[in-house]
Amino acid sequence: MAKDESTAFLQKVYAAKDNRDLEAAYDQWAEKYDAHVTAFGYTIPAVAAGLLGKYVAPETAPILDAGAGTGLMGAILDALGYRGQVGIDMSRGMLDKASARGVYKDLNQMVLGEKLDFPSDHFGACQSMGVFTAGHAPAGAFDELVRVVCPGGCIVFSLLEDVYALKGYKDKFEALENDGQWQLVEKTKPFPGLPLEDPDLMHRVYVFRVC
């Protein structure tokens, strides 16, 4: 059954033991990823698009799509008039699908949590959806995202509620704010990111402005 297959892929990425396992899982999922997450009722891009429209002007460029996957979010932003998007992802299979959309100025294979091959203050904004979740990008990845986004630029991202305190995100957010590196602008209330697959799995979308 299609649902059994899609659930198996989702479980596989959440169960990845390291980045090598995670990259392989997403490479295998790339061909059917869009259909599967749509079937899950994936709500995060719609919520995020509303906040990006509120805080990031369409003429902002370049915009970093950190963890671009197949380019789902990039395609939404392109339809809303955002140009000059640059995407990164650990999975070459996912990047190949994103490239086929024709909405990115550039795509690069990079790993969140490692040093990013971009100069400081390079991007006007950054968005990262479905990336800060169980077994995926670590809290330490925000140090590099803050570095590569210019002062005044916004970082808009989703975060799984279950990992907020448990995996160090709460401490990292507070440390960056206390150090004067960013400020919280807005966060949503918790909502189910995959309501047709797991309605109890709650997410928030955050907006921070780099100082």
Image (cartoon, grey):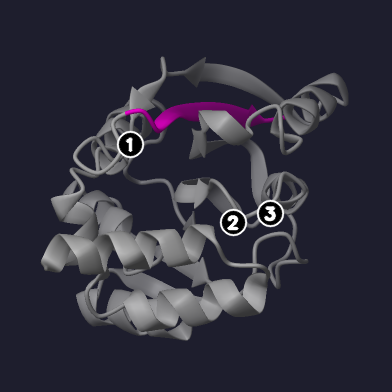
Q: Secondary structure at mark 3?
A: helix
Tag 2: amino acid:
His
Ranked by sequence position, the earlier of labels 2 and 3 is 2
Mark number displayed over residue 87: none
**Residue 110 sits above or below residue 158 on the image:** below
Tag 1: amino acid:
Gly
Count of numbered circles in the view? 3
**Residue 87 sits above or below residue 189 on the image:** below
Residue beneath label 3, please?
148
5 sits to left or right of 201: left
Residue beneath label 2, please?
136
Give the residues drawn in magenta, as a range: 200-211
Ranked by sequence position, the earlier of labels 3 and 1 is 3
User: What is the chief secondary structure element of the magenta stretch?
Assistant: strand
Residue beneath label 1, please?
193
Closest to the observer, 175 or 23: 23
Alpha carbon distance from label 3 to label 1: 27 Å
